[in-house]
Amino acid sequence: MKKIIILLLLLTLTSCSLIFPSRVLKRSGVFKSKGELKVVKSDREEQKILFLGMRHIGRKEFYDDVAKKIDSLQKLEYVVFYENVKDTKDVDFLTAKNSAMKLRKLFGYSPEKHLDTATNIIAGKIKYRGKYKLINQPKYSALKADYLTATWSDVGLTELITEFEKKYSEIKLDSCDFKTDLKNRDYKCKKAKRKLAKNFKKEFISDYRDKHLANKIIESKKNKILVVYGAAHYYGLWWQFQDLDKSISTKK
């Protein structure tokens, strides 16, 4: 099953973004041509942590620059901590598929790809007609990440769904959900309540994953860490470090 990873930008789109998509995309950094490195402050002796903000759709020039930065820093012995909301091999196929359908139930589309490159439609609803050619984020291997040393520092989709249902309520699938293929772009089944989608986005796509990443960094004994994560998570990390370990901190 293809990876399921949510782009915070796409889940926070407002009605205004449907009218002015280029303006919203520019503000969110999608049109940038270079990746931005930020320092994560650590008081631990000899530990250096850098944060490279990722965009899940963007220009080829941006990803080329990201690949160069990752490659160069790995040669300086930095270990990549990367994001990817994927289920591990211990989650069976049917469970993983149900989790993907529940995610679609929440948001009304299946975000396996953020951008349909054939139609230039983003998140299944926004038609992009801007001057830049956009592509989906390449795999980390194409971005020069060395899987022999890199660390997956994210959470599985089924874990996110399970924890959400424990706190709120079960996301109930109906016959329409089971009949509609996950690859079908035209989702017409009944969506979950908007408030549930909002809670899932804030508390689990953002906060839960930020806390998980912060703990991964805190527990790591690596002296050089390069965090390659969605750019919005940089500020989420700051809040988590305030609660978990103030010896490590991003600059809010």
Image: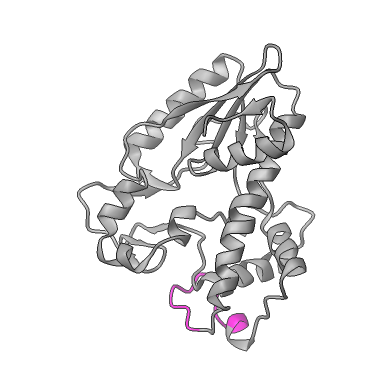
Tell me where the magenta segment starts and ends, as one range: 177-188
Q: Position of residue 213 (x, y in %)?
A: 66, 40
Using the rendered view, name the quadrant where residue 32 is placed: top left
Decide whether residue 179 is among the magenta residues. yes
Residue 94 in the figure: left or right of residue 28: right
Q: Nearer the viewer, residue 146 or 205?
A: 205
Q: What secondary structure characterizes most of the magenta part?
A: loop
- Report if residue 152 is visible in the image: no
> Can you say whether 100 is above or below 177 in the image?
above
Decide whether residue 183 is among the magenta residues. yes
Q: Residue at x 70, y 44 (%)?
A: 212
Q: Nearer the viewer, residue 18 or 16?
A: 16
The residue lying furthest to the bottom in this view is 175
Residue 19 in the figure: left or right of residue 202: left
Indicate the quadrant containing the N terminus: top left, top right, bottom left or bottom right.
bottom right
Residue 106 in the figure: left or right of residue 143: right
The residue lying furthest to the right in this view is 90
Q: Residue at x 74, y 67 (%)?
A: 167
Q: Nearer the viewer, residue 242 or 28?
A: 242
Q: Position of residue 216 (x, y in %)?
A: 72, 36
